[in-house]
Image (cartoon, grey):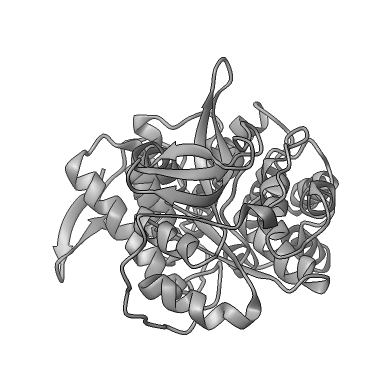
């Protein structure tokens, strides 16, 4: 599965071999110049001398407006609840209509949520948003104590339905109870006080999405927010922290599928696609939930970047067999087919991705490039990544 070798005190995955069954001979890898990260430009590093946190803290509940999610709409509902803290008056239908024009769309990615805030909601409200990998309980508490709503992406298991992705708005905490308080678009808000979510329980399912978190803030408080983030202010460093956590978990338990998968996600965002592919191979060999690629698309990117186009195609076909309502399924398969020279099929599938989400900017750009003969791997490797329900 690859070896963990210490380099400068930090374990690094050496891509020696994979555990997946043999795959067809991969096509040659595309020649690209991987960027250190593709989901956000680096933010200025800021520092702040940490002050002791209060034992408990909550956002002002009078400023929060709860919304129970409509069908398949937890991302838009949770985001709208967080935005309501800053006077945003629209309900989830506005955000949902922009982020997922087809109500059956199974996934809204964090970058789509942040884009909605910064490009749409900010036009009528004094609000901005950003997101990072590699969060932790203390960081979430520090943000909440200083008046910043925090949205996390987490795994969620439903009786008879199995594992799926979910968003949760953290709006308070209490150390004496070792618990967060949350507005959950599916399970409720405990009369406005916030549903208790134990720290251990939260962390157990938060790690399914590499402890990804979204912070909503007023632009005039951006410097303060970045200072509170500390090392996480720089998204590259935040991703490195996520990687270090995942590799430490791999070292502790070589059969931890989520640790391997999270290492693959972090390696992908850092542009180390070879190691990412090895980590994903190991995660899939151990066994991932069947909905994984509804939400998390980094395996497509890592396999694409390393020329494993058949793996992209096969995994996307498997995902399509479970639902057609994930536009990225067709986007990445189209890109792989384009690299194999099957341009007509790629154009058809890219159009299909746009039928499921007409606002899918990456697919719009790729389709135009396919039609005018300028398609390149870099179009795919610089596209948005990551996700939630």
**Residue 378 shown left or right of residue 252 in the figure:** right
**Residue 92 shown left or right of residue 43 in the figure:** right
Query: At x 79% / y 52%, what residue is drawn?
Result: 347
Query: At x 56% / y 59%, what residue is drawn?
Result: 214
Percent x, y for residue 357?
80, 49
**Residue 19 shown left or right of residue 5 in the figure:** right
Report the residue that reaches farthest toward the top. Answer: 160
Quadrant housing the N terminus? top left
- Residue 323 in which image quadrant: top right
Percent x, y for residue 109?
63, 52
Near-viewer residue (10 or 367): 10
Q: Is residue 225 visible?
A: yes
Percent x, y for residue 208?
44, 42
Query: At x 46% / y 71%, what residue is drawn?
Result: 235
Against 223, residue 70 (above or below) is above
Marks counted in the figure total 0
């Amino acid at each position: 599965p690859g070896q963990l070798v210490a380099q400068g005190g930090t374990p690094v995955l050496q891509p020696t071999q994979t555990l997946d069954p043999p795959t067809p001979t991969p096509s040659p890898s595309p020649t690209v110049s991987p960027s250190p990260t593709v989901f956000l430009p680096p933010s200025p590093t800021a520092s702040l001398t940490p002050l002791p946190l209060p034992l408990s803290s909550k956002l002002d509940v009078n400023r929060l407006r709860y919304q129970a999610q409509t069908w398949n709409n937890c991302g838009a509902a949770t985001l709208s609840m967080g935005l309501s803290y800053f006077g945003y008056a629209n309900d989830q239908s506005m955000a949902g209509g922009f982020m997922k024009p087809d109500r059956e769309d199974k996934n809204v990615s964090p970058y789509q949520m942040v884009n909605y805030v910064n490009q749409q909601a900010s036009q009528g409200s004094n609000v901005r948003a950003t997101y990072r990998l590699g969060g932790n309980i203390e960081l979430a508490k520090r943000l909440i104590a200083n008046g910043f709503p925090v949205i996390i992406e987490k795994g969620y298991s439903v009786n008879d339905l199995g594992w799926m992705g979910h968003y949760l708005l953290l709006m308070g905490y209490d150390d004496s109870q070792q618990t967060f308080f949350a507005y959950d678009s599916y399970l409720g808000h405990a009369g406005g006080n916030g549903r208790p979510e134990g720290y251990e329980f939260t962390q157990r399912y938060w790690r399914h999405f590499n402890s990804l978190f979204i912070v909503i803030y007023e632009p005039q408080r951006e410097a303060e927010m970045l200072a509170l983030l500390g090392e996480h202010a720089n998204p590259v460093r935040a991703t490195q922290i996520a990687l270090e956590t995942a590799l430490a978990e791999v070292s502790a338990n070589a059969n931890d599928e989520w640790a391997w998968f999270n290492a693959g996600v972090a390696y992908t965002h850092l542009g180390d696609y070879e190691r990412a592919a090895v980590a994903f191979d190991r995660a899939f060999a151990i066994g991932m939930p069947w909905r994984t690629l509804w939400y998390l698309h980094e395996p497509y990117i890592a396999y694409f970047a390393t020329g494993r186009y058949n793996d992209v195609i096969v995994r996307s076909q498997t995902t399509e067999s479970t639902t057609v309502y994930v536009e990225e399924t067709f986007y990445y398969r189209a890109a792989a087919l384009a690299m194999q020279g099957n341009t007509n099929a790629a154009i058809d599938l890219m159009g299909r991705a746009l039928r499921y989400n007409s606002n899918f900017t990456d697919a719009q750009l790729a389709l135009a490039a396919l039609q005018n003969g300028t398609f390149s791997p870099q179009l795919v490797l610089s596209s948005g990544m990551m996700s939630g329900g």
